[in-house]
Image: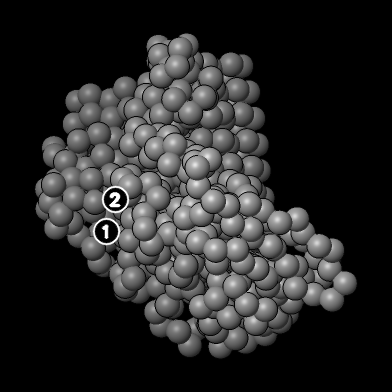
């Protein structure tokens, strides 16, 4: 809800005042023989919106941002859009305002070839680069891998442009393997091969024999990436990436409330494309300690996800134990814990959940735990869902719930329908000591009533041509 107000306020504050002067910004492609770009006029003191950021292309190179000098040094990068991750003010004083006419110069990255573990580790020295693996790489020499790219605070509401410590480049694995990734501590709390990726690309890569064994405070943890973000008009793509023989054991110890995610590929995704990815192996997650509660996301390939998932498969076996003395809300999905757009994907691993009387809410889906808004179509789910010692749960062969909380946000942003279409499930449910479990073969929440929109008729829920075979 707050995000909507944030966007509307930002639009109002970014509206030019015709009584103010204009500055000219010239975008220079910065190479010999480059075509000229038109100048842009910006009201003095205003930021340049992300929608006005040129994204040029050049054969054989990758565009790596705009800079205030031809040398294109890191400290010279010009950032567009909004920095602050909070809601007010939507355009903080430390965003980059245009106060005079100026030139901005494009940086172009050429492919950097990687053949050793050390060279892969050094990718963090240039987070805008274009990297190509020339052979398989073994990371055994790193007992606890330090992620490439860092996450800064609660920045999921901020433009990914301002994730200045995130990886923003491209890694092309060319079909090669990275073996023996080890993650053994909870520092930093975004833990994976890549800690944070914004408007970047990772493709044609296999992570094999990953060993994740962590006992720490709540964190976002996954083999490939902890958290990813895509700005409108940009591309954030994870494509043709596989996780083979994952051995993952995570214990999260609560002391306060908070969000956490543990998955087989990516822990958190905000506006991105994940396609043609596969995960197999086992994942054991325990939430212990005590606190004020929070949200936990457990999924085969994705945790807290607001993205476009296409043609992905998970056969990860998921075992989750909630022993914490706290009112936790838990979302678990064979493919992903939460979802928006999911197409032509499937989950076949078994899901096992053990709770306790303090467990607040549990949503489990053979495919997706909580469908937030969007469409799931042409997907399949199978495997056994086992739940025990849980006061109440909502379980579905395809999805655990249609989330009406997030559906309200979808309605306000113009989403007309959340639907399950042409999906098949053969998931089976087993329960032990569960006094209140709502189970349906397709959706644990059934088909909710339509949500009234902010500007009129709102979003509806539909289940079309979906079947469950017990």
- The answer to whether residue 23 is left or right of residue 35 is left
- The answer to whether residue 108 is left or right of residue 357 is right
Q: Position of residue 318 (x, y in %)?
A: 40, 49
Q: Position of residue 181 (x, y in %)?
A: 49, 74
- Location of the N terminus (image quadrant): top left
Q: Which mark is residue 140?
A: none
SS type, badge 2:
strand
Residue at x 47%, y 55% (from the top left corner): 45
Determine whether 376 is above or below 178 in the image.
above
Q: Quadrant of residue 256?
A: bottom left
Determine whether 346 is above or below 53 in the image.
above
Determine whether 348 is above or below 112 in the image.
above
Determine whether 311 is above or below 111 in the image.
above
Instruction: Tell me, yes or no, if residue 221 can be seen here.
Output: no
Residue at x 56%, y 28% (from the top left corner): 375
Disc 2 designates what residue? Answer: 259
Residue at x 46%, y 70% (from the top left corner): 165
Q: Position of residue 7 (x, y in %)?
A: 43, 38
Q: Nearer the viewer, residue 51 or 329?
A: 51
Local packing at callout 1 (Cα closer than 10 Å; few below 14, some 14-19, many 20+) is many
Instruction: Tell me, yes or no, if residue 115 can be seen here.
Output: yes
Real-space Cα separation, disc 2 to disc 1, in angstroms: 7 Å
Q: Which mark is residue 218?
A: 1
- Residue placed farthest to the right in the image? 33
- The answer to whether residue 197 is left or right of residue 449 is right
């Amino acid at each position: 809800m707050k995000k909507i107000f944030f966007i509307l306020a930002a639009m109002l504050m970014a509206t030019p005042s015709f009584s103010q002067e204009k500055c000219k910004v010239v975008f220079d492609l910065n190479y010999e023989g480059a075509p000229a770009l038109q100048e842009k006029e910006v009201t003095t003191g205003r930021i340049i919106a992300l929608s006005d950021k040129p994204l040029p292309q050049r054969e054989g190179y990758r565009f790596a941002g705009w800079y205030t000098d031809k040398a294109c040094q890191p400290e010279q990068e010009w950032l567009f859009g909004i920095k602050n991750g909070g809601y007010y003010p939507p355009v903080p004083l430390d965003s980059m305002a245009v106060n005079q006419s100026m030139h901005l110069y494009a940086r172009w990255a050429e492919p950097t070839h990687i053949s050793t573990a050390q060279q892969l580790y050094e990718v963090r020295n240039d987070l805008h680069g274009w990297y190509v693996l020339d052979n398989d790489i073994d990371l055994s020499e790193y007992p606890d891998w330090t992620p490439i790219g860092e996450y800064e605070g609660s920045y999921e509401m901020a433009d990914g442009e301002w994730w200045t410590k995130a990886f923003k480049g491209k890694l092309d694995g060319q079909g090669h393997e990275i073996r023996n990734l080890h993650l053994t501590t909870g520092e930093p709390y975004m833990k994976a091969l890549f800690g944070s990726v914004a408007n970047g690309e990772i493709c044609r890569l296999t992570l094999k024999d990953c060993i994740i064994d962590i006992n720490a405070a709540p964190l976002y943890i996954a083999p490939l990436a902890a958290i990813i973000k895509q700005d409108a008009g940009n591309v954030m793509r994870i494509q043709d990436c596989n996780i083979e023989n994952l051995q993952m054991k995570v214990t999260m110890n609560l002391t306060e409330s908070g969000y956490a995610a543990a998955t087989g590929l990516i822990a958190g995704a905000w506006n991105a494309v994940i396609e043609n990815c596969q995960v197999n192996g086992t994942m054991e997650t325990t939430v212990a300690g005590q606190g004020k509660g929070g949200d936990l996301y457990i999924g085969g390939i994705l945790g807290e996800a607001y993205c476009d998932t296409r043609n992905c498969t998970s056969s990860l076996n998921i075992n989750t134990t909630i022993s914490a003395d706290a009112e936790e809300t838990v979302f678990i999905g064979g493919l992903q814990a939460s979802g928006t757009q999911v197409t032509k994907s499937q989950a076949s691993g078994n899901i096992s959940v053990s709770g306790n009387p303090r467990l607040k809410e549990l949503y489990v889906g053979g495919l997706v735990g909580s469908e937030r808004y969007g469409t799931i179509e042409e997907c399949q789910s199978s495997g056994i869902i086992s739940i025990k010692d849980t006061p109440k749960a909502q379980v579905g062969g395809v999805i655990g719930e249609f989330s009406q909380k997030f559906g309200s946000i979808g309605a306000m942003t113009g989403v007309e329908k959340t639907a399950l279409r042409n999906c098949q499930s053969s998931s089976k449910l087993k329960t032990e000591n569960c006094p209140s479990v709502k189970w349906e073969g397709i959706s644990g929440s059934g088909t909710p009533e339509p949500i009234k929109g902010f500007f009129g008729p709102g979003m509806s829920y539909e289940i079309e041509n979906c079947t469950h075979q017990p």
